[in-house]
């Protein structure tokens, strides 16, 4: 550290608990009195290590200890400042009429290819050249921006997301989750953000990060996760026994696990980078294969971490063996202008209106922790409640059970957020995947007759714990699953 930097840091450490740190005042205390702008830049660079945030008036103060608050309302739109920055990038690369002519045709063909290949990409790396990165940003950026905020709110609801955060974003891509994280945090939060992204997507990411707040300190590591030094300067320290302890409050793995050759090995490495009181957030698309893979990986590393949410473990010593297809659905976003422009400029015979508009917010996720904390920490009494692992002996009988609501409505009737996915034949009654963490096959709650006493099933949020009294157990041959019929005899309560 240079003498000048050392002097600035020393004075900042002295003043941080006395009064707001003014670069002009610090300048007077440093030899040769550097310009206040130089001092301000040095303070910005050292802010993460000093725990300082910069205020609008240009002074620096310690970051508060209060946790980040959860979302208060749905995400309605992708912010204009990011949309405008993306369009500027597109105009620089493809010209002012990027959405039209040959460049528009190119981007539309890229998006079509990405959509097609992604459905078959599990275990295969995706080659993000400049065109693919641009198409991916146009089509996926808004949805991932919103999805990560809903998942972060899961942690914030329990006060588990601090205002001073060190974050590692593995496979950061074009930056949807990164931008969502930055906007989820309040202006007085301090974010030290590290992205691992080897592809051309990093160019888009770095461009968009310029629009984030003054207290976001970002570094993009252009390397693969397999080559990333978790225990080096980017995070991790060793104790006397040589064990590495992670230094990241949050590790993000957003929409990347399905593209890795050895996702389990990467997931274990990333868990090692998580601080003792931190969390790993894995996000995946809601489609069947990637969602099921996420649950399989979650279960594979369960010996090294605690599943915080949304999956539950309500019975000691029990783990599920079902397919695990579970995803959340949130309200659609407003159509971003860049998607509308590209869609409306399409003139080929293959085009269906809305083909290049993607405002759905559907996602699977897993939050893992190292401190044993669970969002729902319940041990059930065998004598009081039926266990899903033993549901075979209850077929055609009515039972009492406790389970988490593990999906929105899967019947396609529009209730509970709606979803086009189907999981139980053509029955129009609201149908929800449920779980107690012991099931060997899928279990669904089917609402056949809504009453005031069973309406809490509709009102419960994704991941909420519910008790069911007098639910009728039936076996569904077509789906090879159990249907728990919720009718006029069934009472459902949401449990705290």
Image: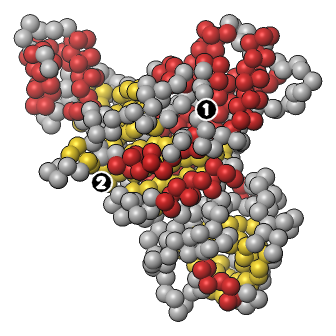
Tell me, yes or no, whether the two marked residues, 2 and 1, touch with CB atoms within 8 Å.
no
Frontmost of labels 2 and 1 is 1
Residue named by callout 1: 126
Question: Which image quadrant: the N terminus?
Answer: top left
Q: Residue at x 60, y 43 (%)?
A: 123
Q: Quadrant of residue 343?
A: top right
Image-based side of 369 in relation to 94, left or right: left
Relative side of 314 to 399, left or right:
left
Looking at the picture, tell me which residue is in the foreground, 231 or 28: 231
Q: Relative to 137, say whether 421 is above or below.
A: below
In percent of the image, x 20 and y 49: which residue is there? 242
Residue drawn where x is 75% and y is 72% of the image: 480
Q: Nearer the viewer, residue 456 or 409?
A: 409
Measured as percent of width and height from the top left, residue 128 is found at 59, 25
Element type at mark 1? loop
Residue 76 visible? The answer is no
Q: Residue 124, image x and y in percent?
A: 61, 38
């Amino acid at each position: 550290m240079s003498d000048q930097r050392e002097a600035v840091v020393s004075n900042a450490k002295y003043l941080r608990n006395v009064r707001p740190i003014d670069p002009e005042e610090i300048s007077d205390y440093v030899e040769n009195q550097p310009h206040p702008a130089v001092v301000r830049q040095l303070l910005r660079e050292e802010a993460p290590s000093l725990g300082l945030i910069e205020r609008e008036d240009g002074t620096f103060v310690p970051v508060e200890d209060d946790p980040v608050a959860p979302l208060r309302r749905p995400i309605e739109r992708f912010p204009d400042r990011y949309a405008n920055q993306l369009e500027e990038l597109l105009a620089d690369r493809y010209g002012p009429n990027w959405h039209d002519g040959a460049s528009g045709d190119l981007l539309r063909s890229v998006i079509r290819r990405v959509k097609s290949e992604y459905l078959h990409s599990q275990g295969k790396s995706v080659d993000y050249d400049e065109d693919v990165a641009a198409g991916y940003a146009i089509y996926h950026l808004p949805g991932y921006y919103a999805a990560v905020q809903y998942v972060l709110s899961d942690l914030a609801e329990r006060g588990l997301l601090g205002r001073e955060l060190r974050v590692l974003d593995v496979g950061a891509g074009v930056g949807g989750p990164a931008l969502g994280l930055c906007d989820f945090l309040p202006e007085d939060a301090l974010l030290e953000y590290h992205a691992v992204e080897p592809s051309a997507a990093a160019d888009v990411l770095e461009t968009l990060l310029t629009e984030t707040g003054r207290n976001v300190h970002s570094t993009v590591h252009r390397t693969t996760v397999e080559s990333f030094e978790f225990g080096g300067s980017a995070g991790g320290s060793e104790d006397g026994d040589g064990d590495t302890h992670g230094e990241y409050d949050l590790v993000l793995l957003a929409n990347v696990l399905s593209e890795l050759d050895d996702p389990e090995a990467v997931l274990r490495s990333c868990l090692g980078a998580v601080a003792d009181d931190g969390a790993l957030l894995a996000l995946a698309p809601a489609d069947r294969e990637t969602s099921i893979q996420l649950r399989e990986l979650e279960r594979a590393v369960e010996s090294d971490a605690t599943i915080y949410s949304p999956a539950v473990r309500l019975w000691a010593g029990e783990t599920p063996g079902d397919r695990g297809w579970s995803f959340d659905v949130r309200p659609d976003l407003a159509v971003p202008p860049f998607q509308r422009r590209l869609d409306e400029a399409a003139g080929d015979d293959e085009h269906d209106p809305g083909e290049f508009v993607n405002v759905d917010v559907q996602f699977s996720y897993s939050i893992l922790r190292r401190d044993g904390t669970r969002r729902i920490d319940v041990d059930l009494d065998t004598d009081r409640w039926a266990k899903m692992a033993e549901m075979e002996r209850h077929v055609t009988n009515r039972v009492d059970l406790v389970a988490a609501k593990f999906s929105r409505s899967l019947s396609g009737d529009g209730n509970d957020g709606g979803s086009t996915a189907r999981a139980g034949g053509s029955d129009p009654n609201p149908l929800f995947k449920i779980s107690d963490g012991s099931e060997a096959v899928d279990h669904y709650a089917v609402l056949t007759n809504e009453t005031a006493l069973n309406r809490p099933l509709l009102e419960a949020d994704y991941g909420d714990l519910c008790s069911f009294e007098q639910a009728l157990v039936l076996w569904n041959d077509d789906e090879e699953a159990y249907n728990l019929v919720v009718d006029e005899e069934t009472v459902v309560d949401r449990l705290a």
